[in-house]
């Protein structure tokens, strides 16, 4: 009933917590590379990112209205924000505005992620509590059944020992000198097996 405890590697614990910062930093780095390769003050590139960002936001609204799936809506709005952030970071010529947007985007990403982490932690705790209760219930049932089976085995052993002792007593009594089974039968006692009948 006891399951082995598996210790998670520290990278497996830290990686989900670092994911929002890694994602926004990656978007900032790619936008600055894009800026250095011709996106700076490019109206066409800025218009493209605006259209993509608006499209992702519209997809988030449509997903929220049609399915109500919060994960899908959150993903669509996160993509919209990332595209808008990449467009501004790629269009501007200095670093202060992209860094400001990066800090705001990182804070927003952690705020959204914290909500999902709380929900996931709550679900995990509820599942662990349910599993623990079921494990305790089955352990109790198993203990009761073990006691019941042990009792039955002991009763069977006691009955077998009694039968063996009774048979030994009958054989011993039949070998005593002067033992007359017919006298017992005439006295109204049940017929006892004799040594001759036992041999047959």
Image: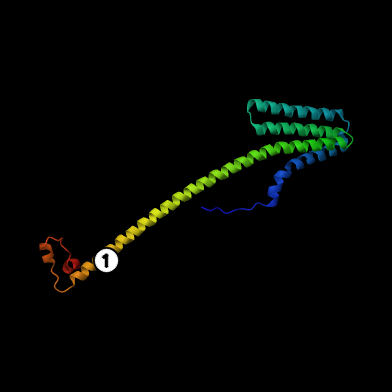
State which quarter of the image contains the C terminus: bottom left
The residue identified by callout 1 is 165
Q: How is the image coloured?
A: rainbow
Give the residue displayed 80% in from the left and 38% down from the top.
Answer: 103
Secondary structure found at label 1: helix
Q: How crowded is mark 1: few (under 14 residues within 10 Å), some or many (20 or more)?
A: few
Decide: is 48 above or below 167: above
- Residue 13 horizontal side relative to residue 43, left or right: left
Residue at 11 percent across and 66 percent down: it is: 183
Image: 3 above or below 91:
below
Residue 143 at x, y = what percent?
44, 53
- Of 90 and 134, nearer the camera is 134
Task: Please count the marks in the image.
Answer: 1
Residue 124, picture quadrant: top right
Q: Is residue 151 left or right of residue 185?
A: right
Q: Which residue is drawn at 24% across and 68% down?
A: 168
Residue at far bottom of view: 177
Report whether 33 appears left or right of 190: right
Horizontal side of residue 171 vs 8, given as left or right: left
Q: Quadrant of residue 36?
A: top right
Indicate the quadrant where residue 190 lies: bottom left
x, y percentage for residue 156? 32, 58
Q: Where is residue 130 in the image (x, y as percent from the top left)?
A: 54, 43
Q: Horizontal and vertical percent for residue 114? A: 69, 39
In the image shown, does 43 or 167 lie closer to the viewer? 167
Q: Could you tell me which residue is drawn at 27 percent across and 66 percent down?
A: 165
């Amino acid at each position: 009933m006891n399951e082995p405890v598996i210790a998670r590697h520290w990278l497996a614990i830290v990686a989900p917590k670092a994911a929002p910062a890694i994602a926004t930093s990656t978007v900032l780095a790619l936008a600055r590379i894009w800026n250095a390769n011709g996106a700076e003050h490019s109206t066409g590139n800025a218009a493209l990112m605006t259209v993509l960002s608006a499209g992702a936001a519209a997809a988030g609204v449509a997903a929220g209205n049609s399915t109500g799936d919060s994960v899908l809506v959150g993903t669509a709005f996160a993509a919209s924000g990332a595209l808008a952030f990449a467009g501004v970071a790629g269009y501007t010529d200095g670093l202060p505005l992209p860094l400001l947007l990066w800090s705001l985007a990182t804070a927003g990403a952690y705020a959204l992620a914290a909500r999902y982490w709380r929900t996931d932690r709550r679900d995990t705790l509820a599942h662990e509590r349910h599993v623990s209760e079921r494990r305790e219930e089955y352990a109790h049932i198993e203990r009761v059944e073990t006691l019941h089976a042990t009792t039955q085995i002991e009763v069977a052993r006691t009955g077998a020992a009694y039968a063996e002792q009774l048979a030994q007593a009958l054989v011993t009594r039949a070998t005593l000198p002067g033992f007359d089974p017919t006298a017992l039968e005439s006295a109204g006692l049940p017929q006892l097996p004799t040594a001759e009948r036992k041999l047959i």
